[in-house]
Image (tube, rainbow, N blue to C red):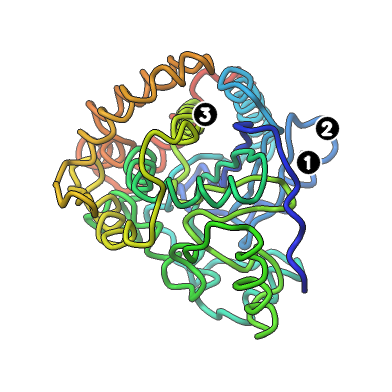
């Protein structure tokens, strides 16, 4: 199958996808409620789109295309309110978080959809273990070459997004000691990790994708689970490393950071990316997953070491003029607060320490998601 032609988009436009947990409010375990939720939501106007995910205890929401943080945040809040209201009617809780703290993958049901059934047949138990929840951010690019430039220029900043969004410290009732354990589930898939280092869209299409398609391993870009992947049919790159935050406001702020950072990178003040930039990519990515903001990055060009927190704070200062031009300084201020005070993983650990039972971690996530929602 041929790769879709790269459809140019307005540079820097944003779209967000959030995978969300469906929870029983009695025992706080995951519940296979997505068929009922989707049936209810399809009967009424929904601000954005809502679709099934691979198991029935998940749904995915997607925004429209936005140029500003303000309109993106406003749509996400409307979507959140609609989901909370639908969940209340069905007696189903909706929340963020990159993993459910104590669910067991053996109890998950695959959503009845041909693609999900094919994936389940191919990957076996990994498919049900894939009941993890992430935020994907799409950023519009003028052409395929620009998309590949940004994809590779972002490689050194991937740990920022992992650490800021990290919200998956618990798995099957246990503190994993990771801030983001979710990415370990994704790493089990053979087509995960990073994209190949190609800077020309023509080369990417002919030297890589066409050859992969001829092997029969892949049929479309959906078959790649890369940390960042191009989406030619949308004219975007898609950042996929973030856990789903506990609030939609935080999800919007993370998207705004990507927008401002890419605007800065396109000024081409730094040297262009090279293959050797990936020398420490896996190490730096692990540091962000394991230690979050306390992780230590190694610069592959200078060999300097810096904490992820300090690198985020320095980068927020560097991209501040870009954020000012985009109207998203408030989003950067929120991320600065997270970098200084702690991420969602830290909040979930505090909930466990202060409230005891692991079920109370889910109760905290449910409350955080619906904060400022209208009472129904």
Front-most of 236 and 49? 236
Query: What residue occupies the far bottom of the structure in this picture?
Result: 215
Give the residue number, with chain letter if any, for mark 2: 44
> Marks 1/3: CA distance?
26 Å
Q: Would you identify the image quadrant in which residue 374 lies?
A: top right
Q: Earlier in the sequence, mark 1 or mark 3?
A: 1
Q: Pick the quarter of the image with the N terminus.
A: bottom right
> Marks 3/2: CA distance?
24 Å
Front-most of 318 and 274? 274
Q: Where 147 falls versus 53 (above or below)?
A: above
Nearer the camera: disc 3 or disc 2: 3
Give the residue number, with chain letter if any, for mark 3: 252
Percent coordinates x, y for residue 141 in the rendering: 63, 40
Total residue callouts: 3
Please tell me the numbered disc located at residue 154: none
Q: Would you identify the image quadrant in which residue 187 lies?
A: bottom left
Q: Secondary structure at mark 3?
A: helix
1 and 2 marks in contact (CB < 8 Å): yes
Percent coordinates x, y for residue 293 in the rendering: 23, 40
Front-most of 288 and 199? 199
Q: Secondary structure at mark 1?
A: helix
> Marks 1/2: CA distance?
7 Å
Give the residue number, with chain letter if any, for mark 1: 40
Percent coordinates x, y for residue 214 in the rendering: 70, 83
* Residue in view at x 58 percent, y 48 percent: 147
* Residue in view at x 39 percent, y 42 percent: 161
Taking 306 as reference, is 329 left or right? Answer: right
């Amino acid at each position: 199958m041929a790769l879709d032609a790269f459809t140019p988009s307005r540079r820097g436009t944003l779209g967000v996808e959030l995978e969300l947990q469906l929870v029983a409010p009695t025992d706080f375990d995951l519940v296979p409620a997505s068929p009922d939720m989707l049936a209810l939501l399809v009967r009424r106007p929904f601000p954005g789109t809502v679709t099934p995910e691979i198991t029935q205890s998940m749904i995915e929401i997607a925004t429209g295309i936005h140029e500003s943080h303000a309109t993106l945040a406003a749509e996400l809040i409307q979507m959140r309110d609609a989901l909370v209201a639908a969940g209340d009617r069905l007696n189903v809780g909706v929340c963020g978080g990159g993993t459910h703290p104590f669910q067991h993958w053996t109890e998950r049901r695959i959503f009845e959809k041909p693609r999900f059934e094919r994936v389940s047949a191919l990957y076996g138990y990994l498919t049900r273990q894939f009941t993890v929840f992430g935020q994907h951010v799409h950023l519009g690019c003028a052409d395929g070459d620009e998309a590949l430039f940004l994809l590779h220029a972002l490689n050194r900043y991937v740990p920022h997004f992992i650490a800021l969004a990290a919200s998956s410290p618990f798995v099957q009732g246990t503190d994993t000691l990771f801030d983001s354990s979710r990415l370990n589930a994704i790493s089990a898939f053979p087509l995960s990790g990073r994209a190949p280092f190609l800077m020309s869209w023509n080369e990417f299409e002919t030297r890589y994708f066409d050859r992969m398609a001829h092997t029969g391993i892949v049929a479309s870009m959906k078959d790649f689970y890369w940390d960042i992947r191009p989406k030619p049919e949308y004219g975007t790159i898609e950042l996929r490393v973030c856990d789903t935050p506990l609030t939609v406001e935080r999800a919007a702020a993370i998207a705004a950071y990507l927008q401002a950072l890419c605007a800065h990178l396109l000024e081409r003040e730094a040297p262009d990316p090279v293959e050797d930039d990936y020398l420490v990519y896996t190490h730096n990515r692990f540091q962000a997953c394991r230690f979050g903001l306390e992780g230590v990055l190694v610069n592959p060009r200078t060999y300097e070491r810096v904490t992820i927190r300090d690198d985020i704070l320095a980068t927020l200062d560097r991209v501040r003029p870009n954020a000012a031009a985009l109207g998203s300084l408030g989003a950067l201020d929120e991320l600065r607060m997270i970098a200084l005070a702690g991420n969602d993983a830290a909040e979930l650990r505090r909930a466990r320490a202060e409230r005891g039972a692991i079920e109370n971690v889910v109760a905290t996530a449910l409350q955080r998601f619906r904060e400022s929602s209208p009472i129904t």
